[in-house]
Image (cartoon, rainbow, N blue to C red):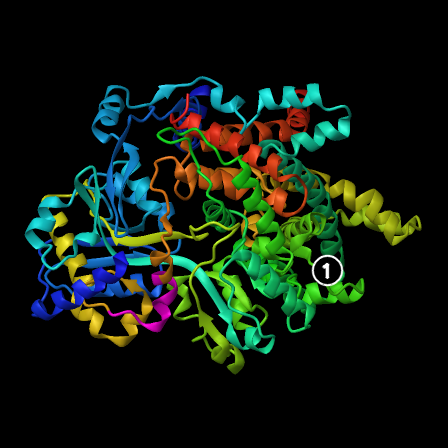
Amino acid sequence: MYLKTLTTAGALAVLSATTALSCEISARVSIVGNEFPAIQTVGAGAQECTGAEVSTNLTADHQQINVAGMSGNPAEYTSAIIANSSIVALMNADVIRPLDDLVEAHGEGLNRNQLITINGQVMAVAFMANAQHLVYRSDVLDQLGLDVPTTYEEMLAAAEAIREAGLMENPVGGAYAAGWNLAQEFNNMFIGYGGQFFEPGTAEPTVNSEAGVQALEMMRALSEYMNPDFLTHDSNATNAEFRAGNVALMNMWGSRAATLVTADGVPQEVVDGFAIAGPMTVGGGDIPATTLWWDGWTVASNISDEEAEATFIAMMNGIRPEMMQDEDIRTQAVWLIPGYEPTPAAVGVFAAAEMGSVPYPMLPYMGLMHTALGAELTDFMQGNESAEQALADVEAAYRAAAREQGYLQ
Amino acid sequence: MKHRTFFWFFLPTGLAMLLFIAAPIVSVVIQSVTAQHEPVLITVETCTPFSCTEETTIDQEATRELREARPLGRFVGLDIYLDRGHLAVAEVAEAWRTSDSIGAFFSELGDLPFYRAIGFTLTYTFTVTPLLIILGMAIALAVNTLTQKLKGVVIFFSLLPMIVTPLVGSLIMFWMIDNRGVLGNFLSWLVNDPDLSVKASTPLMWIALIVYGVWHSAPFAFVVFYAGLQTLPEDQIEASQIDGATRWQQVRYIVVPHLMPLVTFVALIQLMDNFRVFEPIVGFNASAHATSLSWIIFNDMGGETRQLSAAAATSVLTILGVAILLSPVLVRTWRDFKGKM
């Protein structure tokens, strides 16, 4: 509901503030960020500014280079486009600056919700929301008279029915690739079972718990209905399986749902049967087994004030409300920009927000936990060890890393 | 050579080695015995598009003071070398105490990232290196018997695997062994098991990585051996032919001994290379089944964690590993050298 009030407020705001000003800057702007259609749109918008050079480096490997590229003085990148997980690395390294004065001077028309405020200081400006949710083949479910699953237990039952009927051998899709993706699927499930990653207020891990074991058991049960290569399947490979018509049910990113079946060569029945629903709950819990995400941009601290100002102005041009009048741009994401009206592709993310999903934790040591999960859960998923052992390994690996970084003694 | 002349002759090389080999090693060693300061944590209100909550974050000002007081970080000695991510001394001792058989002990070891990586790295190194030497030698001998016209074309095509970028080469193989790919499909037809998946099976994945390693590096051995074959002592070959030696005997008693120094050279280079196996693991997306020391370094440095000290410690361990691996060859070279003096 938070998102909805936000967009209606935005729709009003856009009526009052749509005087298209040309964007004029006086110092260099250099942007690093992830690569998907919505971010490319923002980058292109920033590059429309004239007066000085605006360069972009949008790549899936942005996290490997953004901290290093902003640590020098002067920093190579004046802005990094990040999400709620990756802003933590930038804040830990102290390479981004508070934006309060720039918001004051040039942030006209921004919604309050777009300002990522930490300890009273604006550290980033968010422009889109994202979440993982169910996408499915309505034709396949209709054929068997199945309801759209709202829980993972129903998903398992539906998968069994589809396999039983001989429609698909492996009807469930999942981005379970060893590493970041596998860890993220665990996070979703763990949150769904009501798990806590850390003892409140400390960096002490608490994933080796009942919720952790239940989450892993559910993931393994799901993997029985997945392509046997699931440990190598990231989001791209999982989408390819869906497009090829091999998968009927999967948990997928909202930012990818809009363009899922627009690729060339997707069979007509997949295009027609493609449907989006909200995230699922698990184990009788109320909180959906998913996390909420925002994407936004930051401004480097190791640059001159002129460059920071130019960067802010250019980035504001990349997220200006007029862009929301373009149908193609609107379908690219669930925009937080004033004037955005949701497209049908956005229902999954909106449902996630309405169902009370929790945001991905912005803790300084969450990245270490995520990495430990990604590396240590593979043995369990292959059936080589017990859930308790796998979670004990996760905690041990996390502790070693957290001790090195000084979060644990 | 006079000492003075030698000094000036060696100076540029020496400086370059100091700058590009010694200095980085020193810096890596320093990094591996220091860790970043313990961050000062505070709980503050954090507002996102979804809600405002109390979240823990780093108190940058307090942490900056610590950092400025001691820019290198805190000295931790060998702690990082001994922690679970590396030599895992405590965990290994514990496994030794609690496991009732050698098998159980090794399975416990396989649960620790460093030993898991070493297990695969050594298996890979000691199967790929001999296989690629044998294959390279076989190709060189075969090509050497071709007519002049054919040689050029065949040499060009034999070198292709080495020209293909490792990451691209392994990605191509990755899709070929997919259970809907050319090789994966063929294999599952061969064993009559439609569910066979190379990517889901640890032993098959190891074999795929090893096959890739041999395919990729054999051309290097081939080129070196082929060059060596151009210097074969014709008179010895002729003499052996007059004595009635078969082709196999010629190879066994003249060609191979003649190429032996080159075999040592190829073995040395390839031992070092294969010990650093990395690209195929990334290309094959195989980290669930096989990891290597280089992969651990990559994993530590990338993403949101940036465990620089852990990566540095693994780097130092890699250097030590290469040194141990090469020591028999180096000792032999040193003995030969002493013998000549």
Residue furthest to the bottom in view is A268
Q: Quadrant of residue A408?
A: top left
x and y, in percent, of residue A369 in the image: 45, 38
Q: Main secondary structure of the magenta part?
A: helix
Q: Give the left or right position of residue A292, taking residue B188 as reference.
A: left
Q: Quadrant of the C terminus of chain B?
A: top right
Residue nearer the viewer, B302 or A261: A261
Q: Give the left or right position of residue A409, taking residue A12 as reference.
A: right
x and y, in percent, of residue A204 in the image: 43, 28
Q: Chain of mark 1?
A: B
Q: Give the left or right position of residue A185, taking residue B335 as reference.
A: left
Q: Secondary structure at mark 1?
A: loop
Which portion, as a residue range, is magenta?
Answer: A341-350
Q: Quadrant of residue B266?
A: top right
x and y, in percent, of residue A331 in the image: 32, 71
Height in image: B238 above or below B126? below
x and y, in percent, of residue A323 in the image: 20, 70
Height in image: A347 above or below A384? below
Q: Is residue A125 visible?
A: yes
Residue nearer the viewer, A335 or A188: A188
Q: Which residue is mark 1?
A: B196
Identity, as a three-letter code, of the amino acid under mark 1: Leu
Residue at 27% from the left image edge and 39% from the top image edge: A71
Residue at 56% from the left image edge and 52% from the top image edge: B285
Residue at 38% from the left image edge and 52% from the top image edge: A357
User: Is residue A229 located in the magenta-colored stretch of the structure?
Assistant: no
Height in image: A402 above or below B168? above
User: Is residue A347 located in the magenta-colored stretch of the structure?
Assistant: yes
Q: Is residue B295 visible?
A: no
